[in-house]
């Protein structure tokens, strides 16, 4: 057994543990990353916008709001939240360097 296989079997040195199980800490870090959140927000904005694009003015005039409008707004909110996280970390790093 090679050194790398022993580390993987013990759950060290890689993303996957024994029999291909995903390391939960890796998954948690991936899902909590502001960059992952930004990509998810971009997908929400895109899908909501493509659904609402053709009828947005009529929907606003009639007050007829559907799920696609909510997805669009939720995507914007999540995008702004992830951008503030990215910029706050960037500011902290620049403050530490100076």
Image (cartoon, rainbow, N blue to C red):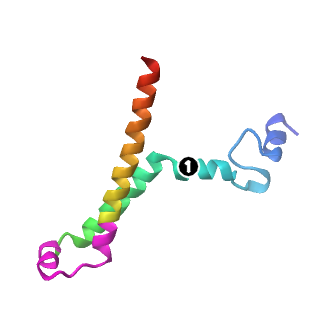
Q: In which quarter of the image is residue 77?
A: bottom left
Please give the name of the residue rendered at 70% of the width and 51% of the height, measured from the top-left corner: 23
Left or right of residue 44, residue 21 in this image: right
Query: Looking at the figure, which quarter contains the N terminus?
Result: top right
Q: Where is residue 59 in the image (x, y as percent from the top left)?
A: 17, 78
What's drawn in magenta, residue-wise?
A: 56-72
The picture places residue 53, in percent across and down from the top left corner, at 19, 69
Give the answer, above or below, for where 90 lies relative to 39.
above
Q: Position of residue 48 (x, y in %)?
A: 30, 68
Asked if residue 26 lies left or right of residue 52, the reply is: right
In the rendered view, does 57 fall on the left or right side of 78?
left
Question: Mark 1 sits on what residue?
Answer: 30
Q: Is residue 5 magenta?
A: no
Residue under the image location 32 percent in, 76 percent down = 67
Q: Closest to the observer: 9 or 88?
A: 88
- Judged by its main secondary structure, the magenta piece is helix
Secondary structure category for the residue under label 1:
helix
């Amino acid at each position: 057994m090679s050194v790398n296989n022993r580390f993987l079997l013990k759950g060290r040195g890689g993303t996957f543990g024994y029999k291909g199980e995903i390391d939960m800490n890796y998954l948690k870090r991936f899902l909590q990353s502001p960059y992952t959140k930004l990509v998810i927000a971009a997908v929400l904005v895109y899908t909501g916008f493509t659904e609402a694009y053709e009828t947005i003015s009529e929907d606003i005039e009639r007050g007829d709001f559907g799920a696609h409008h909510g997805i669009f707004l939720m995507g914007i909110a999540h995008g702004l939240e992830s951008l503030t996280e990215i910029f706050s970390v960037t500011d902290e790093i620049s403050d530490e360097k100076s």
